[in-house]
Amino acid sequence: MNRLLSLIAGVSLTFVLAGCYESSSITSYEPGVYKGNKDPLLQASADQRAETMKKRFEMVQIDR
């Protein structure tokens, strides 16, 4: 019985510690700094940008 409890505690501890692992895919943030991909929409003219934003809005909001 003691051996079974030790095994359960060991497995549980392994899972708990694995949840604390910090992988390299985690994004770190800095206040005021955008680290995402560049948006090609920002390079477009104001008219093109407005038209693209209208299309994006309609694709999402059309069913509401």
Image (cartoon, rainbow, N blue to C red):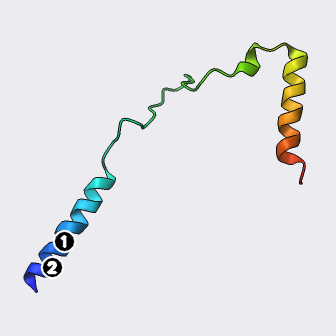
Of 33 and 57, which appears nearest the observer? 57
Q: Secondary structure at mark 1?
A: helix
Q: Secondary structure at mark 2?
A: helix
Q: Quadrant of residue 14?
A: bottom left
Which quadrant is the C terminus positioned in? bottom right
Reply above or below: 39 against 14. above
Reply above or below: 40 against 8. above
Q: Position of residue 63 (x, y in %)?
A: 89, 54
Mark 2 surroundings within 10 Å by alpha-carbon count, few (fewer than 14), some (14 through 19), many (20 or more) = few
In the image as oriented, which residue stretches furthest toward the bottom? 1
What is the number of the mark on residue 9?
Answer: 1
Q: Residue at x 91, y 17 (%)?
A: 47
Mark 1 surroundings within 10 Å by alpha-carbon count, few (fewer than 14), some (14 through 19), many (20 or more) = few
Q: Residue at x 89, y 41 (%)?
A: 58
Q: Position of residue 12 (x, y in %)?
A: 25, 67
Q: Residue at x 26, y 55 (%)?
A: 17
Amino acid type shown at disc 1: Ala
What is the number of the mark on residue 36?
Answer: none
Determine whether, in the image, residue 7 is placed left or right of residue 23.
Answer: left
Q: Residue at x 90, y 48 (%)?
A: 62
Amino acid type shown at disc 2: Leu
Residues under numbered marks 2 and 1 in contact, where contact means CB atoms less than 8 Å apart: yes
Q: Position of residue 5 (x, y in %)?
A: 15, 79
Q: Quadrant of residue 23?
A: top left
Which quadrant is the N terminus positioned in? bottom left
Q: Position of residue 48 (x, y in %)?
A: 87, 19
Give the residue pinned by disc 2.
Answer: 5
